[in-house]
Image (cartoon, helix red, strand yellow):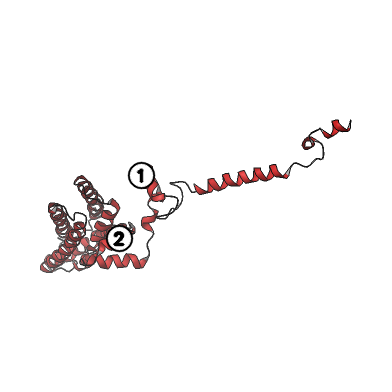
Amino acid sequence: MEEGYTSLPTSHLLGSVPAAVAEESTKGAASESSSANLQIFPPANGGYQAPGSPYGGDDQAANSWRGVCSISSYTPYFNVDTDIVVGRFISSVYPMNDFTGKIDVNPDLYGPIWISTTLVFMLAALGNCATYLMRKRNEPDTMWTFDVTYVNWAACIIYGYALAVPVAFYFLLRYFGCNASLIRLWCMWGYSLFIFVPSSLLLIAPVEIFRWIIIILAGAASSWFVALNLKSYIEGSDLMVLIVSALLLQFVLALFIKIFFFV
């Protein structure tokens, strides 16, 4: 009888204590699985993922088209402070400053969006104001009304130019074998429009020759800024026609701003 009792498995008897070894092994396996799960959290497109993070947020967002529709994919491009943005404003006005080197590590989209939106409303408001001053100077008795369509035209021209032109040059550069970045081109072209913001304030003056001088100087500086920074992408390649095309497009935009909004 004693041999029969001793041969029963004690782990199934009432009041018996389970072996601690099994419990510890279960906890160890659970902790390993939880730590494994933590290594893949956050998911590729969920939550903030800083550039160069161990989760590979940038690589996954760049290699997956699903990242285009994810807000977290664009978060690093808005992670800038006031000093950085102001420094890039100054570099865009002074073309000889190395703007490409400034945005090489962390190109941003905050500045280009802010510049484009500000320029849209300034062109619409100041363009109407300049037209009013010119009408009152030449024909004091003429009735004048605010032209709301200036807002639509300014939005279509500025946003369309800031979005479409960098995309076109990106595909052209890639077609000719140049290593180009669409985000950096958007950033560079967006900051190239900054000089038109203070220039639009000067274009209010109802003196036609003064307006032409201001817009020619602003267009020349902005065109030269685009040409210098675009040149860094085609070093070693005979693609001067692309630089000349970008320079002419930028200058044509300046002329359009003067002729359409500041008549």
Q: Quadrant of the C terminus?
A: bottom left
Q: Position of residue 167 (x, y in %)?
A: 24, 48
Q: How many marks?
A: 2
SS for callout 1: helix
Tag 2 and tag 1, C-beta contact below 8 Å: no
Task: Return the disc, 2 or 1, that comes first in the chain's sequence.
Answer: 1
The residue at 36%/44% (across/down) is: 63
Numbered tag placed on residue 103 in the rendering: 2
In the picture, residue 220 is in which quadrant?
A: bottom left
Is residue 141 visible from the viewing direction of this image?
A: no
Report the side of 4 relative to 85 (left or right): right
- Relative to 57, does residue 128 appear above or below in the rendering? below
Identify which amino acid the numbered label 1 is placed on: Asn
User: Viewer-proximal residue, 209 or 69?
Assistant: 69
Numbered tag placed on residue 85 in the rendering: none
In the picture, residue 140 is in which quadrant?
A: bottom left
The residue at 31%/67% (across/down) is: 86
Numbered tag placed on residue 63 in the rendering: 1
Q: Position of residue 12 (x, y in %)?
A: 78, 35
User: Viewer-proximal residue, 188 or 110?
Assistant: 188
Mark 1 residue crowding within 10 angstroms, few (<14) / some (14–19) / many (20+): few
Mark 2 residue crowding within 10 angstroms, few (<14) / some (14–19) / many (20+): some
Identify which amino acid the numbered label 2 is placed on: Ile
Q: Quadrant of the N terminus?
A: top right
The residue at 28%/65% (across/down) is: 89
SS for callout 2: helix
Q: Position of residue 261 (x, y in %)?
A: 18, 58
Report the side of 155 relative to 139 (left or right): right
Measure how far apart labels 2 and 1 are at the Cα level. Answer: 22 Å
